[in-house]
Amino acid sequence: AAAAAAADAASAATTTAAPWGNWLKLPSPTQLSSASCLVREGLALGMALLFRILALFSALASAEGFSPEACTEMFATMKKLGGPVPPGEGVPGCVEVCSMVKELKDYWGTSHSEMAEYSCSKGKTYGCVWEGVPPKTLADIGC
């Protein structure tokens, strides 16, 4: 507690001695530590999700039959039928890609427009549609 009080006092002394005066009051090291911890955790979770998506795209790029065009066709069939595609028309990996697109969009919501736009652009590339009655489209998740 004494060390924290000394750090706060040093921070306050540094802030008042700054040439720009008191209008820029810096947070104490204790405040900065807890706030930046939350920001770092949120950013780390978002980046981990992004890296999972990129790894999945990379792995699926070499999968037989998997392509943005094949996924778009499969999801168009799902939307037209109003439910799952017939067994022989499924393309391995498409559902997983679109699940990750939705996870990324749900995670970032509107708080980080660049990441939300990125997820929507990937969803559009793969023609993502999600199972439901009726199937959900990109517009339904806010894209």
Image (tube, rainbow, N blue to C red):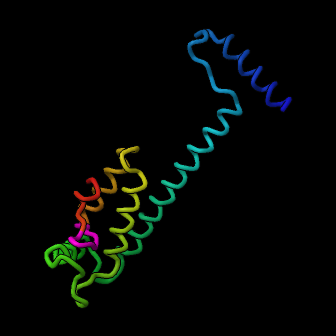
Q: Answer above or below: position of 143 versus 32.
A: below
Q: Is residue 29 left or right of residue 117?
A: right
Q: Where is residue 78 shown, x and y percent of the image?
A: 20, 77
- In the image, the segment drawn in magenta is 127-135
Q: Main secondary structure of the magenta part?
A: loop
Toward the front, the furthest residue is: 133
Q: Quadrant of the C terminus?
A: bottom left
Q: Is residue 2 left or right of residue 32?
A: right
Q: Quadrant of the N terminus?
A: top right
Which quarter of the picture shows residue 140? bottom left
Q: Is residue 76 left or right of residue 101?
A: left
Q: Residue at (22%, 67%) from the top-left corner? A: 127
**Is residue 128 on the magenta stretch?**
yes
Q: Answer above or below: position of 113 versus 142.
A: above
Q: Residue at (23%, 90%) from the top-left corner? A: 88
Q: Residue at (53%, 49%) from the top-left corner? A: 42
Q: Where is residue 30 shown, x and y percent of the image?
A: 71, 33
How many marks the image carries: the answer is: 0
Q: Where is residue 35 shown, x and y percent of the image?
A: 61, 38
Which quarter of the picture shows residue 72? bottom left
**Is residue 88 on the magenta stretch?**
no
Q: Where is residue 76 shown, x and y percent of the image?
A: 17, 73
Toward the left, the furthest residue is: 80
Q: Residue at (27%, 74%) from the top-left corner? A: 67
Which quarter of the picture shows residue 15? top right
133 and 124: which is toward the camera? 133
Q: Is residue 81 left or right of residue 29?
A: left
103 and 131: which is toward the camera? 131
